[in-house]
C-alpha cells in the first residue's frame, strides 16, 4: 500500500459525544455547530436538525429515558457509552464494525489491574446502575457477556477518542475490528475520523504481509512517559526502536532541568483553564510563563506545549498576531517530533497558514498551506472535508497573491 491509501473504514459499534465538547456537537453526526436543536424529552442530546434527530432515535430512544431520569446531571462519558453498548447488544442488531473482531473478543485486562483501578471501575458500575434504572432494573442480572465491570474494562482498553478533522475531541466510540491493530511509537498507519466514521490510512509504503500499526497515544512525549502511559492504560511495555533508544528524548528535555521541571508543573494548570474556556487567564499564564528568561529552546517539550496552548487561547480571543507568533515557533519542533506525514502536524501547519493568510502574509501562507495539504492528503485523504476546505483556501490564497503581484 502506498502512503495515503485508505486501508479500512468503519462505523462505530457505539459512540457518544464527549462532555468536554460542551453541548456544541451533534449527538448523531458529531459535527460541531454554533446552534443545535435540543431533545425536548431528555434536554441533553443535541442535533444539527430534525433529520439528524430522526436518524439518531433508534439508538437514543432507550438512553433518552435514562438521561431524563438523572437530569440535570449528565453521566460520565464511559457510563453513557457502556449503557449504549448494552442497549445495542440487547437489540442484537448486526454492525459492520464487528466484521473482523467482535465485542465479546475484546480484552478487558481486569486481571492485570490493581485494586485502585478496579475500585474505579466499581464506582462506574454503580453509576451505571443508577443511570440505567429506568430501563434495566438490575444491571447485575444482564446476560454473561454483558457484565458491566467486564465491559468497563473492555471499553477502557479499546475505546477511541473521536476527533474532528482538526484533531479536537468530539466523542468517544468503540470500533471492535480496529482493536486488532497493535501499537507502535513509529506506526505505518494513522486513524482519523470523518464525523463518526473511522478512517485508517497508510502513511508510508507498506509491504505485503507487513503488520499494520497505529500509535495508541500522542507520540510527542518522552519514551519514559509513553511507556508509563501504555503500561497504565493498555498493560504492555513498548519495546519499539524509539523507546529502546530513547529517540529524541534529549531534544525534548533540552535546557536546564530545574527550569523545564518548573514549566512542566505549569502545563496542567493551563490545561485546566483551557477546559474551563477561561481564555483570558489561560493566555495570561502562558505569556507570563514563557516570558521568564529560562534559556529553554522551543524544542523543549514543555515550552512547546505552552506555545501550542498559547496559540489556542489567542485564537479563541481573536488575537491573531499573538496567535501567529506562538504558532510559528511550534512548526520546527512539530516537524522534529511528528516526522513523516502526521495529522497533528498537518493541522498545525494549516492553523498557522490560516493565521498568516488573515495577516496578509500571502506568500508565506501559500507555502505553509501547501505543506499542510501535502500531509493531509496522506493522513486524511483528498476527499476528507478538511482537505477539501484546505484546497479551497489554497485556491483563494493563490488568487489573492496573483492579484497582489499583478
Image: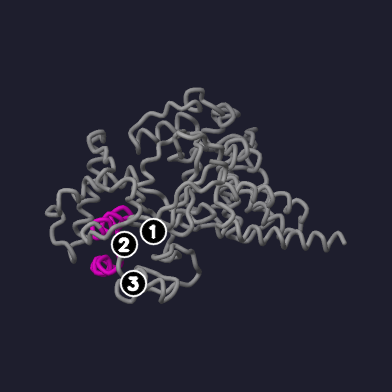
Find out whether residue 80 is within the magenta segment. yes
Q: Residues within 10 Å of mark 3 (few under 14, many from 20)?
A: some
Q: How crowded is mark 2: few (under 14 residues within 10 Å), some or many (20 or more)?
A: some
> Is the residue 271 above or below the residue 239 in the image?
below
Residue tagged by mark 3?
Answer: 43
Of marks 3 and 2, which one's residue comes earlier in the chain? 3
Residue tagged by mark 1?
Answer: 19
Give the quarter of the image for residue 339: top right
Q: Position of residue 24 (x, y in %)?
A: 45, 65
Residue 74: numbered disc:
2
User: What range is drawn magenta here?
Assistant: 60-88
* Residue drawn at 51 percent across, 28 percent down: 242
Marks 3/2: CA–CA distance: 10 Å
Q: Main secondary structure of the magenta part?
A: helix
Marks 2/1: CA–CA distance: 8 Å
* Residue drawn at 63 percent across, 39 percent down: 335
Q: Position of residue 74 (x, y in %)?
A: 31, 62
Question: Helix, strand or loop at disc 3?
Answer: loop
* Residue drawn at 25 percent across, 34 percent down: 114
Marks 3/1: CA–CA distance: 14 Å
Amino acid at each position: 500500500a502506498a502512503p495515503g491509501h485508505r486501508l479500512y473504514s468503519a462505523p462505530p459499534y457505539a459512540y457518544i459525544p464527549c462532555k468536554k465538547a460542551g453541548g456544541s456537537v451533534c449527538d448523531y453526526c458529531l459535527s460541531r455547530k454554533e446552534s443545535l436543536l435540543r431533545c425536548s424529552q431528555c434536554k441533553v442530546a443535541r442535533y444539527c436538525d430534525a433529520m439528524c434527530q430522526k436518524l439518531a432515535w433508534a439508538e437514543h430512544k432507550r438512553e433518552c429515558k435514562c438521561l431524563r431520569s438523572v437530569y440535570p446531571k449528565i453521566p460520565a462519558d464511559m457510563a453513557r457509552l457502556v449503557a449504549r453498548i448494552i442497549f445495542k447488544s440487547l437489540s442484537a442488531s448486526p454492525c459492520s464494525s464487528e466484521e473482523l473482531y467482535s465485542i465479546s473478543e475484546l480484552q478487558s485486562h481486569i486481571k492485570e489491574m490493581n485494586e485502585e483501578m478496579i475500585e474505579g471501575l466499581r464506582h462506574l458500575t454503580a453509576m451505571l446502575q443508577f443511570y440505567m434504572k429506568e430501563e434495566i432494573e438490575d444491571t447485575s442480572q444482564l446476560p454473561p457477556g454483558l457484565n458491566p465491570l467486564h465491559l468497563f474494562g473492555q471499553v477502557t482498553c479499546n475505546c477511541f477518542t473521536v476527533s474532528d478533522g482538526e484533531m479536537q475531541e468530539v466523542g468517544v466510540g468503540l470500533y471492535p475490528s480496529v482493536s486488532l491493530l497493535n501499537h507502535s511509537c513509529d506506526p505505518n498507519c494513522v486513524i482519523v475520523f470523518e464525523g463518526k466514521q473511522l478512517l485508517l490510512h497508510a502513511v508510508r509504503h507498506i509491504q505485503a504481509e507487513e503488520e499494520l500499526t497505529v500509535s495508541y497515544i500522542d507520540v510527542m512525549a518522552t519514551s519514559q512517559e509513553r511507556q508509563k502511559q501504555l503500561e497504565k492504560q493498555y498493560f504492555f511495555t513498548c519495546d519499539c526502536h524509539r523507546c529502546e533508544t530513547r529517540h529524541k528524548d534529549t531534544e525534548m528535555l533540552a535546557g536546564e532541568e530545574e527550569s523545564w521541571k518548573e514549566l512542566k508543573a505549569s502545563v496542567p494548570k493551563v490545561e485546566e483553564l483551557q477546559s474551563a474556556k477561561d481564555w483570558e487567564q489561560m493566555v495570561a499564564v502562558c505569556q507570563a510563563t514563557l516570558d521568564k528568561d529560562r534559556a529553554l529552546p522551543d524544542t523543549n517539550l514543555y515550552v512547546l506545549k505552552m506555545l501550542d496552548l498559547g496559540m489556542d487561547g489567542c485564537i479563541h480571543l481573536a488575537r491573531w498576531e499573538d496567535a501567529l507568533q506562538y504558532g510559528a515557533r511550534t512548526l520546527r519542533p512539530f516537524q522534529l517530533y511528528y516526522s513523516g506525514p502526521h495529522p497533528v502536524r498537518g493541522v498545525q501547519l494549516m492553523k498557522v497558514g490560516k493565521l498568516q493568510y488573515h495577516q496578509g502574509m500571502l506568500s508565506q501562507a501559500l507555502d505553509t498551506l501547501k505543506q499542510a495539504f501535502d500531509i493531509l492528503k496522506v493522513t486524511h485523504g483528498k476527499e476528507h472535508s478538511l482537505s477539501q476546505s484546505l484546497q479551497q483556501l489554497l485556491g483563494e490564497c493563490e488568487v489573492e497573491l496573483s492579484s497582489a503581484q499583478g
